[in-house]
Amino acid sequence: MQFGIFSVGDVTTDPTTGVTPSEHERIKAMVKIALKAEEVGLDVFAVGEHHNPPFAAPANPTVLLSNIAARTEKIVLSTSTTLITTNDPVRLAEDYAMLQHLADGRLDLMMGRGNTGPVYPWFGKDIREGIPLAVENYALLHQLWREEVVDWQGKFRTPLQGFTSTPRPLDGVPPFVWHGSIRSPEIAEQAAYYGDGFFANHIFWPTSHFQQLIAFYRQRFEHYGHGKADQAVVGLGGQAFIRPKSQDAWNEFRPYFDNAPVYGHGPSLEDFTDQTPLTVGSPQEVIDKTLTFREHFGDYQRQLFLMDHAGLPLKTVLEQLDLLGEEVVPVLREELDAKRPAHVPDAPTHESLKAAREAQSVTA
């Protein structure tokens, strides 16, 4: 079981002080947060891709993640998400293979469509073709990482003749891919078809919605012959604000929640915590609620938390990571690993994928 954090890189005014960090400060803070995540024993640091305010970073996740890769040793670096719709698959193949080499294999990535309408025309795309773009672009990316010489023709980009993407994936093993979605069964189908992971970032919508989406992915994963439904590779998002005392957490987080760019001025904090994975409280309360995710979705492989949003100052975020890494994750890891049946796999890593590839070549 992997535990980690993901960031959306928002630049948001702190509602308690009126201070807005500069883009420079926010970008540098994300590096410090990643380093702290490794220090406290988390497994994954993931960052999204955004091209519009109020997000400062990163328009190109590979730049930020390359910097972090050079300064870390163990933590897996990921995206949350990489826009498979508005990026050229050839560029994605080359950029992320390069990052995979620089990180010595400590890389996977999450593909997503992107739901910000204005971004599509900035890159010459139409959001109404989001699903067809995601399907075609990923089919090409998948092929580029697995075939030395590619001949290809599709609808959305110029054809390729005798093309070789460089550098080749490290050890001949492409980065593992998660497909992220909040509402599209077509993306769950795509993940199942390739035997890839499916990441449900269920931080805004009710549990029942994602139960249906994950159940569909599991069913289709088994249909395509990749294993039993409960062996499908599932990741979940989550949110938490933690203080040693529950009431302190509620009092401190409330102004940030009430003024957050996405859900501020909407449902009350009480309603939102009741209906979504957001947990505000003590370490034990975060543990208790997170353990219910297995009851809702089955055994899964990756749990990421959003911790650095809504204008929270860096000092507070780093304190949150101390509590998460020292008091929450060790208990969750022990509890969830003990409950997971032996036939349910761990989250794929470069080393496990490399070993599987070598074993397959021996038996072939």
Image (spheres, rainbow, N blue to C red):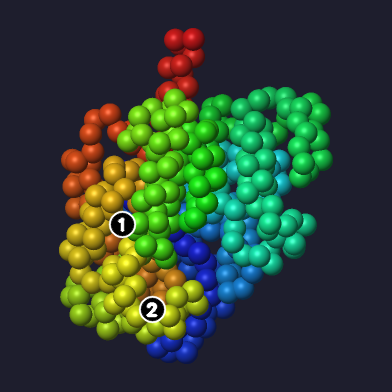
Is 140 left or right of 16, judged from the image as shown? right
Tally of numbered tags = 2
Q: Position of residue 249 (x, y in %)?
A: 26, 77
Q: Position of residue 254 (x, y in %)?
A: 33, 82
Name the kind of residue labelled 1 in the image.
Answer: Val
Q: Is residue 118 above or below residue 155?
A: below
- The numbered disc on residue 177 is none
Name the kind of residue labelled 2 in the image.
Answer: Pro
Say whether disc 2 or disc 1 marks the residue closer to the N-terminus: 1
The residue shown at (49%, 55%) is 183
Eye-nearest disc, 2 or 1: 2
The residue that disc 2 covers is 267
Q: Residues within 10 Å of mark 1 (few under 14, many from 20)?
A: some
Is 45 left or right of 329, judged from the image as shown? right
The residue that disc 1 covers is 40
Q: Is residue 19 above or below residue 216?
A: below
The residue shown at (33%, 43%) is 300
Q: Position of residue 110 (x, y in %)?
A: 52, 48
Is 60 left or right of 2, judged from the image as shown? right
Q: CA distance from mark 2 to mark 1?
A: 33 Å
